[in-house]
Amino acid sequence: MSLTLRINGRDRQIDSDPDTPLLFVLRDELKLKGAKLGCGLEQCGACFVLADGEAVPSCVTPAAVFADKQVVTIEGLAERETGARVQRAFVDARAAQCGYCTAGMVVAATALLEAEPGADRDRARVALERNICRCGSHPRVLDAIEKAAKTT
Amino acid sequence: MNIQEYPLVSDWLRPDGDHLVIRSGKVELGQRITTALMRIVAEELTLPLAALRIEPVRTGVTPDEGVTSGSNSVVDSGGTLRLAAATLRARAMALAAERLAEGVADNAPDLRIADGRITDPASGRHVNLLKILADCGDALPVDPDAPPLPLADRAPAPSAPPLGLEEIVRGAYAFVQDLERPGMLHARVIRPPRRNGRLEAIDAEARAAMAERGLEIVQDGSFLAVAGPAEWDVIRGATRLARGCSWTPGADLDEGDYQDLLLNNPRTSVPVVDGMPQDAPVPPPFEAPDFEATFTRPYQLHGAMGPSAALAEWGKDGRLDLVTHSQGIYPLRQTIAESLGLEENAITISHAPGPGCYGHNGADDAAFEAVLIARALPGRPVLLKWTREDEHGWEPVAPAMVVRMAARLEGDRIAAYSAEAYSDTHRGRPRPGPDRAGPRRLLANTYREAPEEPFVATPNMTRHAGLHRNLDPIYKVGEKRMVKNLVHDLPLRSSAMRCLGAAVNTFAHEAFLDELAEAAGQDPLEFRRAHLEDPHALAVLDRLAEALADSPPAEGAARGIAYAQYKNRMTRVAAAVDLRVTEAAEPVLERILLVADAGRIVDPEGLREQLEGGALQGASWALVEELHWDRDGVIDRDWDSYPVLRFPQVPRMETLLIDRPDAPSVGAGEASPGPVIGAIANALYGATGMRMRRMPFTADRLMSMALAE
């Protein structure tokens, strides 16, 4: 039983067991290592990817569940106008220290601004509730999202 | 210490074609120290940042600078690099003078250095600094008195994104967790169900299941791991193998209130004078002090975003290669060598970035466990990753602490002041020492065949170290009494977390000071001012007062302030916190304002990031974090049972910096948490009229305190 996933705009033939959580297929088989394993429990946001434009954790849900979805990882985000804008804004705001949570944050921020281009700081605060950061970069992440929203 | 062992400029700085390569022994933990060090060298040599490179930190290549900790990197590595760069500049100027003087009658040109060029203004001739650096030779010793570039000639490097950030936002920054090697195996450890459990047996079905799946079992006593080529298979394999293991229960951990354990367990007590523990009798407590209060912090986690990992390969030639996110690769190398009876130089350890650690977390333990697995599978690189459950359940945690304060007032001045701290050790790092102190502090060593006895700590007698960091108040008070109590036989393995004792000691001082100010009928800020003589401390407080003057707390919010100087000699931070308390007793932070003096500023944005990050980690400790345990071990094994500060709880944050270009630069990564915790406690008193002396200040605790009153 072979699985095909559409990832970053390309169809990818997957050899892993379709029950394998998407994150392990991305990282181990496809060598897309931008999404991180933070908890494996859908509690921290480090493994977020876009699935049909929505920011979702990839560490538990089996890859097969994503078969009919457009999956975009942090590596493919720059090809979306909003994604590139968010990435730029994160750099300008210096919105990361260690950077382990950043891919998930950039994905979550992109999903937010694609759905709500004018989202403000308070909206961003709520939208990123599922993303943990331990270095305390939160205010700068909010700065970045605010700036990315204003530069549409 | 680094300059004695690495006396040559070429130990630190090496020209390489179009670049100057910086060799520091300090590692990147997300604090972007690499960027700060580059800026120091760039400024001293007037070179653009693009002309500099950082050598990856590796044993045998970069200097041994011990452990990257204690906010010491800017002072230690930065200080030496500045001297090395200044030495190199002086040498380059001398060489340039010779060259530019050739054929010129006046043989002492008055040279200028700027933008990486040495110019003779008289003739307009110049030489490229990078080219001439290559001729400065490898044998040039670092001049410990090399004068820094005069203030007038300094041009701070333009603000640029820190090293690595562009890669981070694209998902292209490689953490240890992301490494790949040809033929690499993934690995997971199977932990005992109880902290002191010992492996009795692995049943035949589990062994057969591993063989069927192509997975390797690695066992050394009660240390048990599984390895295989595909990560998900290994994760499932570990679950299957765990089902087939039987363990002895082992001794229970002591249960109870950590405060009772800290105050009642056996302890070693020493007085502390001027920040230094003394080998002397402990002075008696004050008789009938006017004020007494006890402040506490529970066990807390470093709680890195990513579980620890390490990549190890045991070569067929017996050489060991290890990639780790440890904060101290040289001490780790010594300890691994001692643990396994190896020659140190048979081991190469490279540092690669990990998730922010905030102190000694599972990094070193994971590194050694990867080595044990690789040793059993020679010739195969092994990438071991801890799980979230491993990290929460087995990292060396931040010790619980109790600080007892007592004081007497005379008028509106503090006439007598006592601070007594109780805690387990903050020194769990696997540093070599007498009595196998290194090996005994690596987790796996206490589970192997012929296990090491658990480490027994002795008091750290260095100035402002361990649990007595910032125990000595920065304030001028009458009679002083400080006591350090290292408490023994506590249930959880503990080690260094950001600030060590300073987080709790500063909380205690700053909350207690507000209590005394109130009793003296004084404004908290004025009361602090009256007990400070240091003009730079007063300047920081003045700046805070000025910034607060025209922005009173919002309707329904209260304000608290606090002040501290880290280790009483590093970065000065004044903090103000505005918060309100909801009807459900939930504290809500509205604003944190920091004013900081870190001497001469190396990287203003980097400095702000460190202070802000510290402030929010301090807020998380103060408001939500508490680790629970029972007789089996740590209970909280995920982010639901161990909550941390999240986006909706993050306040508005402002950071004001005072730059003193003529003062030495000091580190700031640990300067803000203590004052922020104190300011939160003080604001909560303003909001509720209740003194919160026990961290974390949760709604439950506020409620039960209100009901008790």
Image (cartoon, coloured by chain):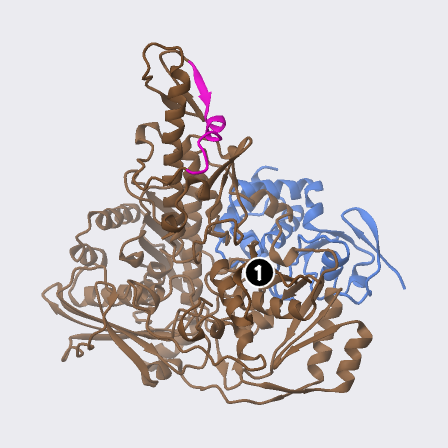
Residue B602 highlighted magenta (yes or no): no
**Res A85 seen here:** yes
Q: Position of residue B491 (x, y in %)?
A: 45, 82
Q: Is residue B527 left or right of residue A24?
A: left
Chain identity for the colour brown used in the image: B
SS for dot 1: helix
Q: Name the residue: 61% across, 57% down.
A: B176
Picture coordinates of residue B51, whole percent (x, y) = 51, 33
B137 magenta-colored: yes
Which is nearer the eye, B271 or A63? B271
Relative image position of residue A146 (x, y in whole percent): 54, 44
Q: Is residue B347 above or below residue A99?
A: below
To which quarter of the image does residue B569 belong?
bottom left
Amino acid type of the residue that numbered disc 1 sits on in the rendered structure:
Ala
Q: Nearer the viewer, residue B399 or A49?
A: B399
Q: Quadrant of residue B507?
A: bottom left
How packed mark 1 is, by other alpha carbons closer than 10 Å (few <14, some 14-19, many 20 or more), is few
Quadrant where the C terminus of chain B sits is bottom left
Q: What residue would you read off at disc 1? A: B346
Q: Nearer the viewer, residue B598 or A87?
A: B598
Classify residue B499 as left or right of residue A83.
Answer: left
> Which residue appears farthest toward the left when viewing the image?
B411
**Chain under callout 1:** B
The letter of the blue chain is: A
In the image, which residues are magenta?
Answer: B125-139
